[in-house]
Image (cartoon, rainbow, N blue to C red):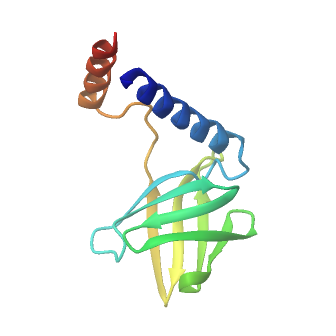
Amino acid sequence: MKKMLLLAAVMLGIFTVVNAQNSPFKDYVGKYVFAAGSPVAEAMVEVQDSTLKVSSAMGSFVLERKGVDTFYLSAYDAFVIFKRKSGNEVESVSISVQGMELVGTKESASIVGTKEEFQTLAVNEKLLY
């Protein structure tokens, strides 16, 4: 039973990653961290059902594409602009809402995460066999 649950979890993770990599929105996917004191501490941008969504402590919302790297967040009447580095990689997001500009920096992606998460994963795998 444990093997089946682990297999299902792994397959779901792989399916999600493959969908994100094939999406035209893959450059935007990730976690964005905002400055201390900002109304939003962090936000996750992900692809769901072929749409780009942003999730934070304030809720989860669909981003409507308006142009290259420019989106509209209708729930807050806000424009969302992703900014790129010279290597064409998305490095930050700027959200213009109610006269404020919120800037979030994209965190670099890691496959496993922390050393402790890796060790826990390795121990759990040994328990299955």
Q: Is residue 110 left or right of residue 125?
A: right
Q: Is residue 54 above or below residue 96?
A: above
Looking at the rendering, in which quadrant would you find the C terminus? top left
- Percent of width and height locating residue 54: 52, 64
Looking at the rendering, in which quadrant would you find the N terminus? top left
Return the residue nearer the eye: 105 or 46.
46
Q: Residue at x 66, y 47 (%)?
A: 88
Of all residues, the one furthest to the left in this rendering is 116
Q: Residue at x 68, y 63 (%)?
A: 69
Q: Is residue 125 left or right of residue 81?
A: left
Return the residue nearer the eye: 38 or 56.
56
Q: Is residue 3 above or below residue 40?
A: above
- Percent of width and height locating residue 123: 26, 18
Q: Is residue 65 above or below residue 32?
A: below
- Percent of width and height locating residue 116: 23, 29
Of all residues, the one furthest to the top in this rendering is 129
Q: Quadrant of residue 84?
A: bottom right
Q: Is residue 123 left or right of residue 17?
A: left
Q: Is residue 85 left or right of residue 42?
A: right
Q: Is residue 76 above or below residue 63?
A: below
Q: Residue at x 48, y 25 (%)?
A: 7
- Percent of width and height locating residue 35: 34, 67
Of all residues, the one furthest to the right in this rendering is 67
Q: Quadrant of residue 57?
A: bottom left
Say how many tags the image has: 0
